[in-house]
């Protein structure tokens, strides 16, 4: 395992142990409960949106380290972000997870920050759903709140 792979593995382990944003929001605008039927990962995610910006994300879940770490990383990326940024990040993470290990543009990896650690996960189709679970819950909660993410053009990497 090379140094970058070790670093990425450590990021995932750290986020699965120290789950950022873990805990229910007191009064979310909407919530979403998502389950990965393949492996049983679960998340209930709440979101609060004000003036086109995600002001809070809280979640409770259980499952594998990949699903829980991915939700933690997503929390850090989207909390405080405007909806256009959230839409771009969601599209980039989706692109990364469907790259099947072929990689994506360096600019995408830079933009995704700690979420770039999931690049190796894309090689394992049965784990992609684990990594995408939180993003599915976020998109659903936003839709339930009446806040849709703007459309984003894929980068085509």
Image: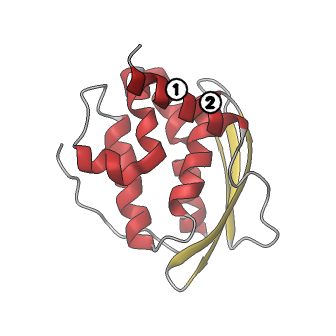
The picture places residue 135, in percent across and down from the top left corner, at 52, 50
Which residue lies at the image location 58% right of the left edge and 24% below the top edge?
38
Q: Is residue 108 visible?
A: yes
Can you give x and y, in whole percent of width and height, for residue 25 in the image? 77, 65
Does 100 sit left or right of 52 as displayed?
left
Mark 1 surroundings within 10 Å by alpha-carbon count, few (fewer than 14), some (14 through 19), many (20 or more): some
Q: Are marks 2 and 1 in contact (CB under 8 Å)?
A: yes
Vertical position of residue 72 compared to residue 141: above or below: above
Mark 2–mark 1 distance (CA, rounded to whole Å): 6 Å
Residue 120, position in %: x, y?
40, 26
Mark 2: which secondary structure? helix
Q: Is residue 122 above or below residue 155?
A: above
| Whether residue 146 can be seen here | no
Q: How many marks?
A: 2
**What colour-coding does the image apply?**
secondary structure
Relative to 67, say whether 90 is above or below.
below
The numbered disc on residue 13 is: 2
Pick the front one: 11 or 40: 11
Residue in the picture at 50% in, 41% down: 132
Q: Report whether 58 appears left or right of 84.
A: right
Which of these two is toward me, 90 or 107? 107
Identity of the residue furthest to the front in this view: 3
Q: Residue furthest right?
A: 26
Q: Secondary structure at mark 1?
A: helix
Residue wearing tag 1: 9
Q: Which mark is residue 92?
A: none
Residue at image x 52%, y 77%? Answer: 53
What percent of the width, then of the height, locates residue 60? 76, 48
């Amino acid at each position: 395992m090379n140094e970058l792979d070790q670093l990425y593995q450590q990021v995932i382990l750290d986020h699965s142990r120290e789950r950022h944003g873990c805990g229910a929001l007191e009064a979310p605008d909407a919530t979403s409960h998502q389950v990965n039927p393949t492996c049983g990962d679960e998340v209930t995610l709440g979101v609060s949106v004000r003036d086109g910006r995600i002001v809070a994300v809280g979640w409770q879940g259980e499952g594998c380290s990949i699903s829980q770490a991915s939700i933690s990383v997503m929390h850090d990326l989207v909390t405080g972000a405007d909806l256009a940024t959230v839409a771009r990040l969601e599209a980039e993470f989706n692109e990364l997870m469907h790259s099947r290990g072929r990689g994506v543009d360096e600019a995408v990896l830079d933009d995704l920050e700690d979420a770039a650690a999931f690049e190796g996960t894309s090689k394992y189709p049965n784990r992609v759903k684990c990594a995408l679970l939180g993003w599915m819950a976020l998109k659903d909660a936003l839709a339930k709140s009446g806040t849709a993410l703007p459309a984003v053009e894929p980068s085509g990497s």
